[in-house]
Image (cartoon, rainbow, N blue to C red):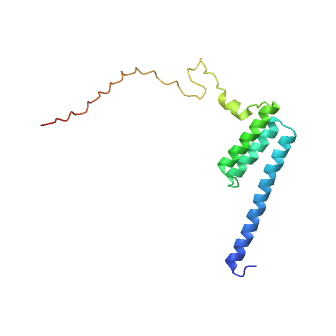
Amino acid sequence: MPIIKSAIKRMKQTAKRRDRNVIAKRNIKSAVKAFLAQPSATGLSQAQSEIDTAVKKNLLKKATASRRKANLAKIAKTAGVTLTTSRKESAKTAKKPATPSTGKTSSGRAPAKATAKKPAVKATVKKPAVKKTTK
């Protein structure tokens, strides 16, 4: 047991961190086991989410997480699990049409003015200087 105050504090901090890390790793293992037992899109999403969380907390390296997620995706593909896009992603990709009555776009701004394009200036290529040889 440490005697110095700072060492005692460090020991307490280490114990807290270890408990947190053990819980996070246990969550990963349980999510992966649940997915392997019953492959589904939600199970895959949950397992990948737990892995991403562990990377964010520096429990796993990026490459390790990438490898594990790739293996899960491979298993999902062989099991025939189809992934559906989340509602947030589908809402972002769906665009609202412009309202023709006001002439404004869905964001409320007027459309950008069309400007005449200027012809592109051709870049002149300089030839390298020729060295004169004297004999």
| Camera-side residue of 70 and 10 | 70
Query: Residue 19: image x %, image y %?
Result: 78, 62
The answer to whether 20 is drawn above or below residue 120 in the figure is below
Q: Point out the residue furthest to the right here.
A: 37
* Residue 16 image-quadrant placement: bottom right
- How many circles with numbers are drawn on the protein? 0
Q: Is residue 109 left or right of residue 7?
A: left
Query: Residue 66: image x %, image y %?
Result: 68, 44
The answer to whether 135 is drawn above or below residue 114 in the figure is below
* Residue 85 image-quadrant placement: top right
Q: Is residue 100 left or right of residue 13?
A: left
Query: Residue 80: image x %, image y %?
Result: 81, 30
| Camera-side residue of 101 and 78 | 78
Q: Point out the residue furthest to the top here.
A: 100
Q: Is residue 56 left or right of residue 24?
A: left
- For the point 72% across and 82% down, the residue is 3
* Residue 99 image-quadrant placement: top right
Q: Which quarter shows the C terminus?
A: top left
Q: Point out the residue furthest to the bottom here.
A: 3
Q: Point out the residue furthest to the left here.
A: 135
Q: Which quarter shows the N terminus?
A: bottom right
| Camera-side residue of 95 and 42 | 42
Q: Is residue 97 left or right of residue 44?
A: left
- For the point 58% across and 24% down, the residue is 105
Query: Residue 108: image x %, image y %?
Result: 58, 28
- For the point 69% across and 76% down, the residue is 7
